[in-house]
Image: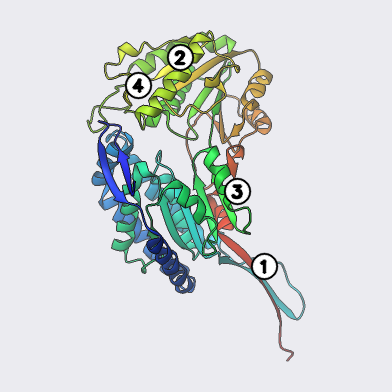
Amino acid sequence: MNVQQTISPVDGGIYAERPFADHAHIDATFDRAVKAQTAWALTSLDQRAAYCTAFCEALLRHTDEIALELAWQMGRPVSQAPNEIRTCVDRARYMIAEAPAGLAPLDPGPKNGFKRYVKRTPLGVVFVIAPWNYPLLTAVNSIIPAIMAGNAVVLKHAAQTQLVAERFQQAFDEAGLPACVFQYIHVAGATAEQLVKDSRVAHVNFTGSVAVGHAVSRAAADRFIGVGLELGGKDPAYVRADADIQFAVENLIDGAFFNSGQSCCGIERIYAHASVFDEFVAKAVDFTSAYRLGDPTKAETNIGPVVSAKAACFIRAQVDEAVYQGARALIPPATFAADAPGTAYLAPQILVDVNHSMRVMTEETFGPVVGVMKVGSDEEAIRLMNDSAYGLTAAIFTRDVEAAERIGDRVETGTVFLNRCDALDPALPWVGVKDTGRGYTLSRWGYETLTRPKSYHLRLPQS
């Protein structure tokens, strides 16, 4: 098949269809990117900031259109999609503001008779391979900093959300960005992996599965380029005995079920202290029962379908297997009228009597399912939180800040949260450990991965 299709989870129909780029189109795209980047690298930071700020304004002008497209492409309710667009813009604006600090020359100190400094110089063409689950946010994490650093960008977006690439292009065009500093291509995943080997690609940022992350890493193995990988997650939370239970429930259930649980930093497993376990679970069930599952294009819906019927089948199978192994499912699917086996619509689910012999507590689910385990101490919670192949974020709910910091020091994770979860602060590096990947984006430190140091060692003329 020579076309890329978006099959909508709303009704199972073809929502968008685009031809795959052929070899001539791909070659021309990267040739144009190389040429455009040479000129773009000579522009001032103020000029780059002006174009990127105009991009943000252009994206906001199309909020309603993009929100509806997201509902049809990946199931995000229209009541929630505008928030991703606004957050995308806020994040972009933060990275624009951080560019002077992130790209500032470094002074190693005085040396008699010499002038010495280190510049942050652009890498060249950055190839961004973006996922469907947060299609604007994950893409902007790399695109705006790359362009602000003086690079050109070629974006390959997921087939499920291919129209987002076109919306980015529209916004950059409306902003007046010089031609070919940003471009997109529609190609199959296997083609994208091969493009990692292309000599015109200077850096790759990939967000997606562990399996594809390994493939991207292998493709780059014979090249001396940077590869940023943000991969899977099975993010844990610990509810200590002194936590505000209602507050913990509201935040953790939202962190587990927002975006139908399709977030790399969503909460997939919760460890609650034995003294508050029953209260936490009872309140979590009550809170979950208030969700309204349904058509994401309807304003009243606050949890939509997962991305596909195939994904829903995988999630149901994980739950069924856990129940067969002794877990208890606390949410009767029948209480959600829209739940329908064979479709992408499935009810959110809370599981108890779970353990780490069950896949639902160790393998990424990427759906509206969370397991809750009873623990007797901080030590047990730490051991279980670390018993994972992944490490993106970990959330701790407690009134004791010092205890949270002590626990956080021992948890193998990229970000430690206290009394919040499923969030991202662009002032901090977004980083994972273990199979969650390598490299980092955002903050002034994120500019380090999109530039290289260039040393200036200048002997001054003698007077």
**Label ID, residue 218:** 3
Q: In the picture shown, does residue 76 fall above or below 113? A: above
Disc 2 + disc 4, Cβ < 8 Å:
no
Q: Does the CB distance between marks 1 and 4 fall below 8 Å?
A: no
User: Callout 1: 10 Å neighbours few (<14), some, many (20+)?
Assistant: few
What is the C-alpha distance between the residues marked 4 and 3?
36 Å
Q: Name the mark nearer the viewer: 2 or 4.
A: 2
406 left or right, relative to 230: right
Q: Earlier in the sequence, mark 4 or mark 3?
A: 3
Mark on residue 346? 4
Q: Which residue is mark 1?
A: 107
Above or below for 299 versus 197? above
Q: Quadrant of the C terminus?
A: bottom right
Give the quarter of the image for residue 274: top right
Q: CA distance from mark 2 to mark 4?
A: 13 Å
Q: Are marks 3 and 2 in contact (CB under 8 Å)?
A: no
Can residue 36 be seen here? The reply is yes
Image position of 417 (left or right of 153): right
- For the residue labelled by badge 3, is the local secondary structure a helix, a strand or a loop? helix
Q: Amino acid at mark 2?
A: Asp
